[in-house]
Amino acid sequence: MTTQEIPAHVPPELVHNIGLTESPEFLADPFKFMAGLHERLPPLFFSVGQQGTHKSWQLTKHSDVYFVLRHPEIFTTHGQGPFPRDPDNYFRIIPLEISPPEHRKYRAIVDPLVSPQAIAKLEANIRKLTNELIDNFIDRGECEFAKELGRPLPVGVFLDIMGLPRSMMDEFVRWAMGLLHAQDRAVAGQVMGEVTAYLNSAIAEKRANPDGGMVSAIVNGKPGGEPMSEREIFGFVFFVFIAGLDTVFAALNNIFVWLAENPERRREIIAEPENINNVIEELLRVYTVTFSGRVLTQDYEMHGVTMKKGDRITSILPTANYDPDVFPNPKEVNFHRPRTPTLSFAGGAHSCMGAHLARLEIKIVVQEFLRRIPEFKLAQPIEYFPGAVIGPKAVHLSWK
Ligand code: HEM
């Protein structure tokens, strides 16, 4: 896709190919890059990705993003799943690609399993698993945080919630990484085959032997009174897997890079244990790891520009969370900021189903790691993955 193929209704002065998620400038320091967009770009612009894959309007202001997320009748999620699918074996990504009002019936199947009350019951288990993982490396005086804690912890918790065996931990880490970060399409295709086979067998097993986990809840779910088709069940189980792993990996890994680089701020967190929820909220604001894509169902005007029905629009959530009109002095990490809703987990009907769980996991890992290893530093420079979930490839920490 070249700049010449920009649709005729897009004003040329609004085309800014900024290399979001893939350019060397972005990858050198993604969060600095995204925080800086307010200073150099209009609030609505049009961009074509380097591979031509992201021909889309882009939004950076908190208020505009808030509006888009709350108007699914204008900005739909249809076909917006962050994952290319085989057209011959197409499945809808559920619940993301279902629109209100039907959407609520699908969320009702899984929401009770990730409500604040349900999640609170997992706390002791998450703390135990976190400490077991720390036990594996604490005496060594160093670790590769992403590999040894940032990835296995969320996978273990996810398996528990889904009602799948913990013995699948290594396999699920490999699958999540292979699907989302393999540079090679053949590798991603091979992994997709393995994941499909495993999830289909897990679905069959839970149909035969139901339990209290999420796979069972989905298999037995009846949105609108009718059972779901096999494809719907697969699209639902598969999307919870895709949505709930890499995002938590990335958030944890980014936060631990920051903790390693900011010893004074680490000590501030340790000194104010009662403020931990605000700490996590603020770190999730400055390290917002993903985006939200929609398609216009009708022509719509914003900032004096008419976007056309069928156009794509991306809310750059990380940038919206640095909007100076909503978060004064946005680049400062301030654990005592007045509470303003962030867009870390998006908003509106499709707001993240796993937000309570993600917050709890991150809080527990920060608390337990800082309790047991209060002083540590980065042992190697950081390199970031390109792509729509922003996080480091590896986080080498040392406390020798
Ligand atoms: C720090 C971790 C996480 C972040 C930053 C995150 C972010 C997001 C965002 C931004 C959306 C909205 C997408 C959109 O509007 O286009 C979303 C939706 C979703 N997330 Fe998360 N997520 C996280 C963890 C999780 C976890 C742990 C789970 C599963 C247990 C999960 C499951 C989902 C699902 C199923 C949706 C779709 C909701 C719907 O369409 O109704 N996420 N997430």
Image (cartoon, rainbow, N blue to C red):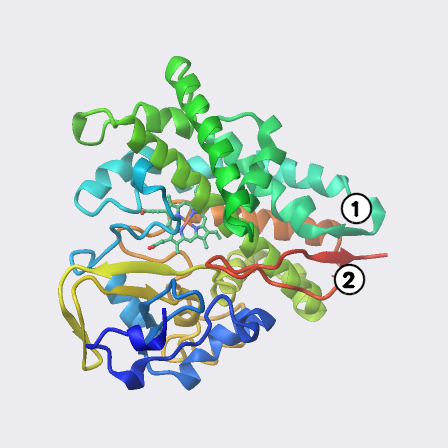
Residue at 44% across / 31% down in the picture? 196
State whether residue 314 appears in this view: yes
Amino acid marked by disc 1: Ile
Q: Which residue is mark 1?
A: 138
Q: Position of residue 255 (x, y in %)?
A: 60, 60
Q: Nearer the viewer, mark 1 or mark 2?
A: 2
The answer to whether residue 70 is visible is: no
Name, please, the residue furthest toward the right: 400
Q: Quadrant of the N terminus?
A: bottom left
Label 1 environment density (alpha carbons within 10 Å; few <14, some 14–19, many ≥20):
some
- Mark 1 → mark 2, Cα distance in angstroms: 15 Å
For the image, the number of numbered tags is 2
Q: Which residue is mark 2?
A: 379
Query: Residue 327: x and y, percent?
Result: 42, 75
Q: Within the image, what quadrant is residue 89 found in? A: top left
Q: Residue placed farthest to the left in the image?
A: 298
Ligand 1 contact, mark 1 (Cβ < 8 Å): no
Which label sits on residue 289? none
The answer to whether 254 appears left or right of 377 in the picture is left
The disc labelled 2 sits on which kind of residue?
A: Ala
Q: Give x and y (percent) for residue 295.
A: 24, 59
Q: Residue at x 47, y 34 (%)?
A: 193
Secondary structure found at label 1:
helix
